[in-house]
Image: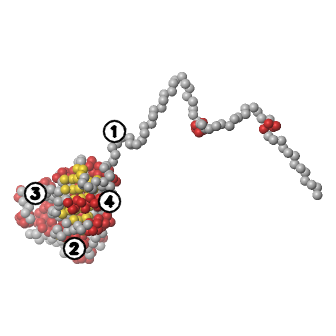
Amino acid sequence: MFTDIQLNERLQKALDAQGITAPTAVQQATIAPALSGRDLMISAVTGSGKTYAFLLPMLQRFIDTPSPKTATRALILAPTRELAEQVSKSCEQLAAFTQIKSLSIYGGEGFKEQAAKLRKNPEILVATPGRLIEHLERQTIDLSDLEVLVLDEADRMLDMGFSEDVLKIAAQCRPERQTLLFSATLNTGDIRSLTEQVMNNPESLLLSDARTQVEAITQQVILADDVKHKERLLNRLLSHEPYSRALIFTNTRVAADQLGNVLSYQKHRAAVLHGDMDQPKRRQVLKLFRENRIQILVATDVAARGLDVEGIDLVINFAMARSGDDYVHRIGRTGRAGESGTAISLISPSEWNLMCSIERYLRISLERRTLSGFEGSFKGPLKTKASGKAIGKKKRPEAKKQDDDKPKVKKRLRDQKAIGKRRKPQNTEPQTLDQGFAPLKKRKAPDAG
């Protein structure tokens, strides 16, 4: 129970209003050490309740020690706009009965409008690294009084190339701050390098990793010959598979747009979400998806982090994720909060090795599935011999052993080429001038006239 943690009554009232009565495992393990002020590295997968795990101790701290005349007191860095919006919304809900204000800033919105909101000096700031760097360079944000820095989905920020931006932002923060880092994994070299530069003797809490997330989700694989075959399989799944909302992933924005057009042509209620869309359009698409006015959302990995929509019970990887962690975050959009979910990956011949590497990373075996009447010619790679040698190569015959009493004769290439050719007879006797050459004829002298 949250009563065991002795939260402020205003925070407890906000939890009661949301119907939250008990903390999740990550909240139970994180809140107490976070209240002590220590730097923490928490390994927690998506959907585990980690947002409240850092918001609750942060708000509790600000309520106990108010500082109305200081600059920004807490900064939460998120890799995507969708995650920043989600965290900001959660912060507003949790601080609904307090005087603490929060603000989210990210690209896709007017810079001047954001600067005007920043002048109101919100205590908590939720931002993406790129837009925050712009505000720091124009000196519209002051982080000199910062008390808490949260790096949410730190592994994703590093994958997106925000490592240098995060270091620049951390350098602008007050050194005597508390830093909380949340990541799906803490074992990568990039994460260790980042923590060494921005954290002070952090405590590691290994609550869960990418491998534990996938156990509650039914995961299947359907083999496909090519993109056209995948489109037919997808249409069959969306027409006959039971689901309330479906989320389909591609690896590129162009592929997402093309697939969205295909689904619209097939009369599916579908929309597209990717990074090339402006923020109002992305917000409108998510609203339609949440209200079930569209049933299918085609997205790139921008939707894999921070997209929290209730009722997603089917995830389809039209293109396989590029890594095991990305795969986990994709399928983690379903099967949330104890609900069941299904994840189906359409695998072409070029994606077979990628699928196998993800299976090895997660230590699982994806269920193979076929759709009657839609089978393709690709059945997986040919089996190889136990020796590991490629099939189709003939085994070289062993050279015949020569008798010890027979001398070994060196074979020359020109002798091999001459086999079977008729040789010209050779005269071994020495030739004389008369034998070898015709006599020279005397030239007739020219006429005198």
User: Can residue 96 be seen here?
Assistant: yes
Residue that badge 3 annotates: 23
Q: Amino acid at mark 1?
A: Ala
**Number of other residues with Cα within 10 Å of mark 2, as a class: few under 14, some 14 to 19, many 20 or more:** many
Q: Amino acid at mark 4?
A: Val
Give the CA distance from mark 2 to mark 4.
47 Å
Q: Amino acid at mark 2?
A: Leu
Q: Secondary structure at mark 2?
A: helix
Q: Position of residue 35 (x, y in %)?
A: 13, 58
Give the CA distance from mark 2 to mark 1.
66 Å
Dot 2 or dot 3: first in sequence order is: 3
Image vertical order of residue 416 relative to residue 4, above or below:
above
Residue that badge 1 annotates: 386
The colour scheme is secondary structure
Image vertical order of residue 370 relative to residue 12, above or below:
above
For the point 90% across and 51% down, which residue is it?
A: 445
Give the CA distance from mark 3 to mark 1.
51 Å
Seen in the image, is 132 located left or right of residue 21?
A: right
